[in-house]
Image (tube, helix red, strand yellow):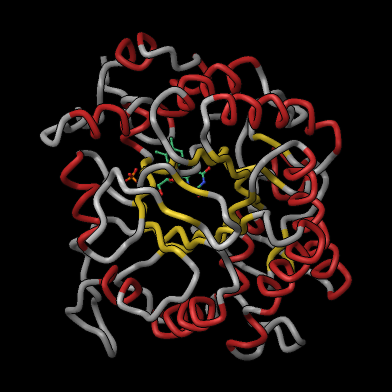
Amino acid sequence: MPILTDPLTLATGSVLQNRFALAPLTNQQSHDDGTASEHDLHWFEQLAGGGYSMLTTAAANVQTNGKSFAGQLGIYDDRHIPGLSAMAEIAHRHRTLASVQLHHGGMFARQELIGSEALVGPSDNEETGARALTLPEVEQLRDDFITGAGRAQRAGFDGVELHGAFGFILSAFLSPQTNRRTDLYGKNPEGRSRLLREIIQGIRAGCGPDFHIGLRLALSGQDPHLPELRDLVAVFLERGLVDYLDLVVRSLDTRVEGGLHTGEVLVDLFTDLPRGTTVVGVSGDVMSAAGAQRALDHGSDFVFVASGAVVHHDFPQRALADHAYETPRPPLPASFFRDQGRSPAFVNYLEESLGFVQAQ
Ligand SMILES: Cc1cc2nc3c(=O)[nH]c(=O)nc-3n(C[C@H](O)[C@H](O)[C@H](O)COP(=O)(O)O)c2cc1C
C-alpha cells in the first residue's frame, strides 16, 4: 500500500513528488476576458508553496459559449497564454507539475455570460433550453479542446485535465440521459464516448507523448448508468488512453444505491479495475491526513485536495508534517478566508455559491 510521501511516476515520465494533487478550483477571480489576474497568480503562488506534487488550474473554458462562471479562466484564445505562462512558471519554480483543466459548460454555461450565443449540448434539453450541437459544431468543439491543450503546452504546462464531470459538456455526451443523438457521437456507448476519445487522440497527436492527459469523472451511487461509466473506465484503464483519472466521489463511504452493484462501495468499484500505466486519483472529502491515506488504502494512487486547499492552501505540507492534521470544516467566518489571502471575488464565490462562509 503506498503512503502519502511516496513519489508517483506518470506514463509520460513526469514524477509527482508525493501523493497530493490540487483539485481544480474555480475562484471567479480572472479578468472578464478570461485572462489570469494578479489574484490568480497570487493564489497559484500560495498553492505552489504548499507542498502539492501537481497543481490543477480552475476550469478554463475552451469556447466562449462554454463559459459557466463570472471571472472564469479562459483558454479559447492566444491572449490567454501570457497569464497561463506565468501560472506554469510559478508551479515549476516550486518544482510542482501543473495541469490546465479544460472545460466547456455546455447546457450549464450561463446565458448572461455568453451573450447572444446559444446554450448547447449533445441534444436538445428542455430543462435548460440548450439546443443540440450540429455535427460540424461537435467537430469544432473537439478541435477547440485540442487547440486549448496546445495553448496549455505553449504556456509551459505539463499537461491538461479534461473536465468530464458534473453535467458539463463532455459528461453530457457520455450520459444516455442527456445524449440522445443518433449520429456517430451518440446511439451507443461507443458513440457517446467518441467525442472524448477523439479529443484525447488529437491531444496526443498534437502535444506528443510527454504531455500528460488527465480525465475527471464524477461518480454517483445513484447514477442509473453507472455500469456504462464503469465499462468506459475499464476500457480507458486497459488501453492506457489517459495518464491519470481524477474520480470525484462525495465520500469514500458512498455506496451504490440501485442496480447491479447495490450496496457496494462506489469508489472500490473503480479502483478495483485492472489498470496498466494509468494512475488513479480520488477527489472527495480529503480534509485530513488520515482521510488522504484512507483514499490510498481504497486503491487510489493519489488524492486531489479541494475544499481542504480552500481552507489551508498548504494542506499537503501540514498533512505530511502531522498524521493527526485535520482542516477546520466550512462554514467559517469570511475573515478566516480573507486573512489567508483569498481575494474578495473568491470569498464572494465561497459565500454566495458554496456556503463556505458563516452568516454574520
Ligand atoms: C471552491 C471550489 C471550486 C471548485 N471548482 C471546480 C472546478 O473548477 N472544476 C471541477 O472539476 N471541480 C471543481 N470543484 C470541485 C472540487 O474539485 C472537488 O472535486 C469537490 O469539491 C470534492 O472534493 P472536496 O470534498 O475535497 O471538496 C470545486 C470545488 C470547490 C469547493
Q: Is residue 37 left or right of residue 55?
A: right
Task: Give coordinates of residue 154: x percent, y percent.
Answer: 79, 41
Q: How many marks?
A: 0
Quadrant where the image shows the N terminus: bottom left
Task: Give coordinates of residue 96: x percent, y percent.
Answer: 51, 35
> Which is nearer the eye, 226 or 9?
9
Task: Give coordinates of residue 45: x percent, y percent.
Answer: 53, 20
- Among all residues in the image, which is located at the extreme left? 324
Asked which quadrant contains residue 202, the reply is: bottom right
Q: Is residue 245 left or right of residue 291?
A: right
> Which is nearer the eye, 63 or 42?
42
Above or below for 350 versus 63: above
Task: Give coordinates of residue 72: x percent, y percent.
Answer: 64, 34
Q: Is residue 21 left or right of residue 265?
A: right
> Which is nearer the eye, 61 or 236?
236
Q: Is residue 232 left or right of residue 241?
A: left
Image point 23% across, 33% down: which residue? 319
Residue 89 can be seen, yes or no: yes
Quadrant where the image shows the C terminus: top left
Above or below for 104 versus 81: below
The quadrant where ligand 1 appears is top left
Image point 42% across, 76% down: which residue? 275
Residue 167 can be seen, yes or no: no
Image point 20% across, 78% down: which residue? 264
Asked which quadrant contains residue 243, the reply is: bottom right
Image point 17% across, 79% down: which residue? 263
